[in-house]
Image (cartoon, grey):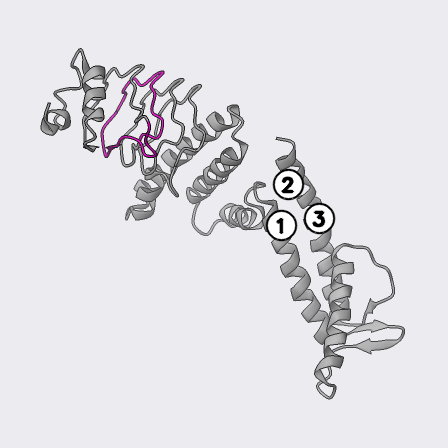
Amino acid sequence: MTDEEWQNGEMAEHGNIKVLLEQRASSGEPMSKFSLVKANLSGINLVKKTSKTGYQLTDSDLYRADLTDAHCFKLDLSGSSLMKADFSFANLHCANLSNCNLLGAVFKGAKLENVTWGEQIMQEQQAAEAQDLAVAKDYYEQAEEVYRNLRMVTEKQGLFEQAGQFFQNEMAMRRMQMPLFSLHRLISKFVDLFCGYGERPSRVVAFTLVVIGVFSILFFYSGIQSSGQTIAFDSSLGVSENFKYYLNSLYFSVVTYTTLGYGDISPTLGLSRFFAAVEALIGGFTLALFVVVFVKKMTR
């Protein structure tokens, strides 16, 4: 069978297509742009034995193809249309599904460990490239649906780290459908940056360090008090003395952020008290949110 026969769709309805495709794969020649629309490939074996790399079936059309119970270990399907293809109970360990159209694809019971999904799914890329807002919104809706499906599938299989990434992408696609300068979109973007929609506790920690550092500088210049002595930047003093003052400001910032309030250092009148109040509010909120995010991640 020539590549042209595989690419023009003539082979899709062949009664012996599974055997023919397995033989074509075993020849070692790359398979590209094959048209396998609605092909019955149930139980097909496309595993390249005793090889570190799998077979290639790239940029192909497998719309509504039946790949239930298929063996696709390390199979490279990158760039292919897998729209509404059925991979129920298929083995897709280490398969490459990057840049594929996964809209409506069924992965019920499929083995999905170490699958390469790519940085972005196809619909997300198309939305970013679309010139018309209505077209872009439609692609973002499709991308949200794909990410939601992948999240649910990976959650059921206990692939929680991957499911968390899909959830974050799902929420990002939902945000992109909101009006550009709307309050909801702004809040959604802040939550993403702040904690990755609850999937990135490390971002809360990073935010904490930034806030403590910023306010320590503000206290250093606005002044704090310790035992009746004002501690603030003084250009007439040397570097070592000013550095000691800064360390006191950093200590006070940590104590204020964590709302410990030992009382050994207090803010001076004016801006220093305002900064302390703002930091305490931010710290109380952030610490509570960190506990929620951390517990969510650990109890999965």
| Residue 218 at x, y percent in the picture | 69, 70
Residue 26 is left or right of residue 120, and the answer is left
Kindly identify the residue that appears in the image at 66 percent across and 64 percent down: 213
Q: Amino acid at mark 1?
A: Val
Helix, strand or loop for the magenta stretch, by majority: loop
Q: Which disc, if any, is residue 204?
A: 1
Q: Amino acid at mark 3?
A: Leu
Residue 88 located within the stretch drawn in magenta: no
Kindly identify the residue that appears in the image at 50 percent across and 33 percent down: 163
| Residue 157 at x, y percent in the picture | 51, 24
Label 1 to label 3, Cα distance in Å?
Answer: 9 Å
Write down the residue under mark 2: 293
Label 3 to label 2, Cα distance in Å?
Answer: 10 Å
Write down the residue under mark 3: 287
Looking at the rendered structure, the secondary structure element under dot 3 is helix
Image quarter of the N terminus: top left
